[in-house]
Amino acid sequence: MRLLIATGGTGGHIYPAIALADAAKKRYDDIDILFVGNDDRMEAKEVPAHGYQFKGLHASGLTGGIVNKMKALLLMAKAYRKALRIVEDFKPDIAIGFGGYVSAPVMLAAHKKHVKTMIHEQNSIVGVSNKMVANYMDAIVICYEKCFEEFGREKTRLLGNPRATNAVQVKFDEAYYRSLGLSMDKPLILVVMGSLGSSSINAIMKDVLPKIDNKYQILFVSGKNNYEEMKSVFPQDNIKVVDYVKQLDIIAKVDLIICRAGATTAAEITALGTPSILIPSPYVAHNHQFYNASVLVEKKAAYMIEEKDLNATVLDEKIKLIMDHPAIKEEMHQHALALGKPNASSDILDWCDEMKR
């Protein structure tokens, strides 16, 4: 099996792609995997760091004024020509695009060279790159029912995000859990707003976290940008502050997570059935986190508080509603599990096998 994977721009595109590559390596004895992405974005470091071959292109999104868009189109044309050469040299059996604007020229090049093609859409709102190429693709994988509205059903399957498979495979690390100062006997609330954190949400946490009953313990992940400010804010013994946490290593013991609603987060918490209060980031393309969260809320798997409505009183009420009512917490757990796609990686690779035949 020769597998070409196009992805780039953000972790939401890159890490599901790496997760699928990891699953493919375990599944096939004889596999050659090549990633293609931007030469100046995080994938240029992250992909080789995970042990995969990487070829870089230079592309940019169709944003800004007419001059910027014209420049982006010229870059896209140049990237397409280079992608044609990469596809010709590598000769993949299948090419899979995980989004990010760099994936569009790669997937169009694969189509041009008569390679079997698949795209993966992580969010409930379809990204620009996947919209551009969808009509030319042989297969489309989605994570939300809503995307059938964009893609139709003829060549689209709801198989989920490979990060969901990763989530259920990671074993709980008790030694790491204890190293964070956490007790095995107290229910745990995890508060995490991404690797950098959120200054506006941190300000609200200063008010709300000390009010939470000390029969619960709280792990507050401040983010790297806010750690120095936040580490000494809480004198309470039941509140631990860290700048970063290996989330999957401890999530088996998390009773409630308060977090953003990115595609990877949603995939992981549904695969594991973790009750959640979602605070979608309003700073992302097409407000897609709001729509991701809305799906979980509609299915009674989560509560959502939009950042514009967030205050200490509202958040405190939601925490008490979940943590003080075991029946509600259990219902959320079951509804989240029902949405989860823990077999996403194997289901996607099964479809790849079908396409090869």
Image (spheres, grey):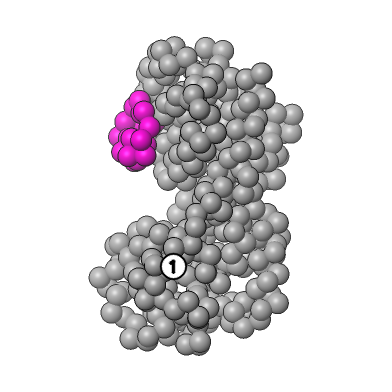
Would you identify the image quadrant in which residue 298 lies? Answer: bottom right
Residue 44 visible in image: yes
Which residue lies most toward the front here? 29
- On whether residue 186 falls in the magenta region, the answer is no
Which residue lies most toward the left here? 228
Residue 136 visible in image: no
- On whether residue 58 falls in the magenta region, the answer is yes
In this rendering, is residue 152 above or below 177? above
* Tag 1: amino acid: Glu
- Residues rendered magenta in the picture: 37-59
The residue sitting at 64% across, 53% down in the picture is 340
Which residue is tagged 1? 174
340 or 120: which is nearer to us? Answer: 340
Tag 1 secondary structure: helix
Q: Residue 339, how many percent across, how many down?
A: 68, 54
Q: Residue 4, how many percent across, how many down?
A: 47, 25
Left or right: 183 in relation to 263: left
